[in-house]
Amino acid sequence: MFKFDFDIEDEGGTSDAASQPIQPTVESDMDERPFVEHSLAEMIENIADEISYSSVQAGDLCIPRRDLFDVRMQLISAEGGRSDETVDTQTAIDFIERPSDLVPRVYEGGLKTWECSIDLATYLARKEYDARGKRVLELGCGTSMPTLALLHHLFNRLPPTDDGPTTTLHLQDYNDSVLEYVTLPNIILAWFFSSAAQKFRSTIPPPPPKDPIKRMSKLQLDSVPEEDEETDARSDVPVMDVSPHVVDPSVPGDLSISLELRTAFLASLKALKIDIGFFSGPWSQFRSRISTPYDLVLTSETIYQPASLPSLVQLLRDGTGSGDCLVAAKLVYFGVGGGIREFQRTLGEGDVNGRAETVWEHKEGVGRCIMNVKFNK
């Protein structure tokens, strides 16, 4: 087990020895976990009946996301009560108190919103990247901040009036519990606060705002990027308008996931011609599933483990068509060995023939950047 040493401290303000950066043991090349495609219809049936949310700022874009403490409450209440509980669900229970701890091929940190995912979401929002009619893949999606930035643009456009191509969004995370507990709920939140859900919102009361004390749960703070911790902890947060005619994603609240909401959400996806697919399991098993390259491939905070770089780079190569492949990462991941230099070295090995161009950079503290990766095929 290891934990990046630039991360927020554990609840209680101290870090135990098990959470300190440790070089993980190199395991065999065999991935124990199977690669699985998950049906949206099945996943939405299993989603919690109510989710608690707050928001994170990605540039000028306010992105609502499910609170980590809310995931914890769902896991605790469901523990032992679900006949279909999987090993991955038990893994989520084990790591919900320590979302920043990583165990290769067991839990890869998807419950936490990582700093570079906010960087990539901000970059896409500022570029006003239009994904309509394109095929998009996000690898190691976790809370799916970059995809949520794309969906913000898609959900706030009028439905297409022609027979143009469908927008395909594929999201992959190593842990299926991450897809169920944070990825899909965050997508639903993005839809609910968009113009696509305006008709549905008119049929229900606005979500009730949360108690400020509940909002500042330490489990929520554990899930925010380091640079946002101080901002979120301030007591001078302005009081927002929560009248019945206003829904504001910056105001923390609770959203009821009713049957009517689920039906309206699926109907909106159909009207907007958006197809969303979910995949869990190792990258090495994903390559054989790619029949058509993607127009845009996204990944953030996934190059920290040197042993996994070859399979990631091969998947990026196979999945990228003539479009962009954007990789957001820190310059170095202390205590792990991975980083941008190791990633660039892997791009030049074997028949990969890849090169990375830095398109955005943050030099203060632990350096971060976004790279556009191109492959000569």
Image (cartoon, rainbow, N blue to C red):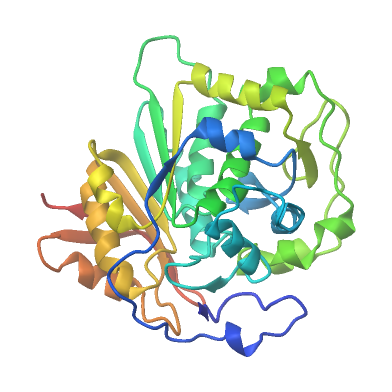
Tell me: 240 left or right of 348: right
The residue sitting at 58% across, 71% down in the picture is 100
Q: Is residue 160 visible?
A: yes
Residue 12 location (% of width, % of height): 78, 79
Q: In this view, does 352 lie above or below 22?
A: above
236 or 310, which lies in front? 310
Tell me: 337 left or right of 5: left
Q: Is residue 143 visible?
A: no
The residue sitting at 64% across, 48% down in the picture is 83
Residue 309 location (% of width, % of height): 29, 67
The image quarter in which residue 248 lies: top right
* Residue positioned most to the front: 83
335 or 75, which lies in front? 75
99 or 205, which lies in front? 99
The residue sitting at 34% across, 34% down in the picture is 135
Q: How many marks?
A: 0
Residue 201 location (% of width, % of height): 74, 23
The residue sitting at 41% across, 81% down in the picture is 336
314 or 145, which lies in front? 314
Residue 333 location (% of width, % of height): 43, 77
Q: In this view, does 255 lie above or below 123?
A: above
